């Protein structure tokens, strides 16, 4: 397949997903039909079905995209601050999630996606794979901070990665349920909890 | 109202909520109708409607109960370990949540309740009130650990309480989506992150 056509397909797919995100953020996954998606995207049913066989596939694609985005954010802020503190890296990840949420309602879509993962075995499997992959990646980041003594050396890097994911997931839940103002002071707390001078316990 | 009658009403209400929890854990909030609840409880519609006007009221009652239970757990383990570390208290809270989850599917019901909170303004308002109350209570607990130097004195107790809630919420999400085995090592990580000997940053 020539590259231009691939690029066109990717752009088209992304355009449909953007429309779906807007519709989902407004009315929720369940109240939104494929017809609502056609209308939001301004495309025919055939044009959308060329990319996604049904609503489930759209939901899976958005969930995969969200987790990939959050993984990329975390990697970016961590590499950028490789000689900074774990707290600063985590705070920067949280601030990026907050900015993304103000832009496209990321947090509300995330919370709904978790319920879908419990309801639909296909979405559940996709979520498990992606969450497990994110934990492996984060474990490498965490191991770096264990070596530089800003995280305790005792517990496994995987277990600390699970705590890190819990903080991000729980932050997203509060962002969705309480709004950005209620959790505006979380980045400061994270920077203070794991400053670069912290001594491992 | 005489006390025995009050006690009967409380027991009846709790019996109906237990039946609802079983039905919800099995089929989810949305796929479960009031008729399913009557069948699960083995009661007539009239007997159930005497306590709850509809499914929304049942969901709100379960959400309130869950948050109250989690609040009570956290207070209990914190008071019990007032001279222990913050990490040990948090680990004990997480272990209690895990035991409760194995007993009645708490985590899956929790995740579904968050989505309901986004969908239904009444449930959203109840959730916001309860989550804000939990944060105020946790802020007092956190302030104790700030005074005893196991948590950094700089950030507000409220912001550290929000991080604490994030860890518990994110743990519940992973418990629901990945299962207890995947997060079995989280209590060890929490104990290591905030040991009693930790020096505030």
Image: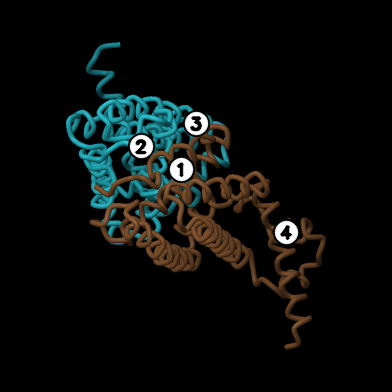
Chain colours: A brown, B cyan
Asked if A120 appears above or below B62 in the picture, the reply is: below
CB of mark 2 within 8 Å of CB of mark 1? yes
Label 3: chain letter: B
Label 2: chain letter: B
Dot label at residue B50: none
Dot 3 falls on a residue whose secondary structure is helix
Q: Read off the residue under disc 3.
A: B128
In primary-sequence order, the first of circles 2 and 1 is 2
Mark 4 and mark 1: Cα distance apart in space: 26 Å
Q: Quadrant of the N terminus of chain A?
A: bottom right
- Residue A188 drawn at (x, y percent): 48, 37
Does label 3 lie on the same chain as label 4? no
In-image side of B14 versus A103 (left or right): left
Q: Residue at the location (31% across, 40% down)?
A: B18
Mark 2 and mark 3: Cα distance apart in space: 14 Å
Quarter holding residue B87: top left
Mark 3 and mark 1: Cα distance apart in space: 12 Å
Asked if B138 appears above or below B101 in the picture, the reply is: above
Can residue B141 be spotted in the picture? yes
- Farthest top residue? B1
In-image side of A144 versus A76 (left or right): left
In primary-sequence order, the first of circles 2 and 3 is 2
Does label 1 lie on the same chain as label 2? yes
Asked if B40 appears above or below A184 in the picture, the reply is: below
Q: Residues within 10 Å of mark 3 (few under 14, many from 20)?
A: some
Q: Read off the residue under disc 1.
A: B113
- Residue A13 drawn at (x, y percent): 71, 69
- Residue B78 drawn at (x, y percent): 23, 32
Label 1: chain letter: B
Q: Read off the residue under disc 4.
A: A37
Residues A201 and A116: in front is A201
In primary-sequence order, the first of circles 3 and 1 is 1
């Amino acid at each position: 397949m020539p590259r231009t056509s691939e690029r066109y397909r990717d752009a088209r797919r992304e355009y449909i997903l953007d429309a779906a995100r807007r519709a989902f953020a407004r009315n929720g996954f369940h109240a939104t039909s494929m017809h609502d998606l056609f209308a939001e995207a301004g495309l025919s049913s055939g044009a959308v079905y060329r990319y996604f066989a049904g609503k489930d596939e759209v939901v899976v694609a958005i969930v995969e995209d969200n987790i990939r985005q959050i993984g990329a954010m975390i990697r970016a802020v961590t590499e950028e601050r490789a000689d900074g503190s774990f707290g600063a890296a985590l705070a920067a990840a949280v601030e990026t999630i907050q900015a993304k949420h103000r832009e496209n309602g990321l947090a509300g879509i995330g919370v709904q996606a978790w319920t879908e993962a419990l309801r639909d075995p296909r979405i559940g499997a996709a979520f498990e794979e992606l969450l497990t992959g994110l934990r492996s990646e984060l474990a490498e980041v965490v191991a770096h901070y264990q070596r530089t003594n800003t995280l305790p050396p005792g517990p496994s890097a995987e277990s600390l990665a699970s705590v890190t994911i819990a903080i991000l997931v729980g932050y997203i839940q509060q962002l969705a349920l309480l709004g950005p103002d209620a959790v505006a002071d979380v980045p400061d707390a994270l920077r203070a909890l794991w400053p670069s001078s912290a001594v491992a316990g």
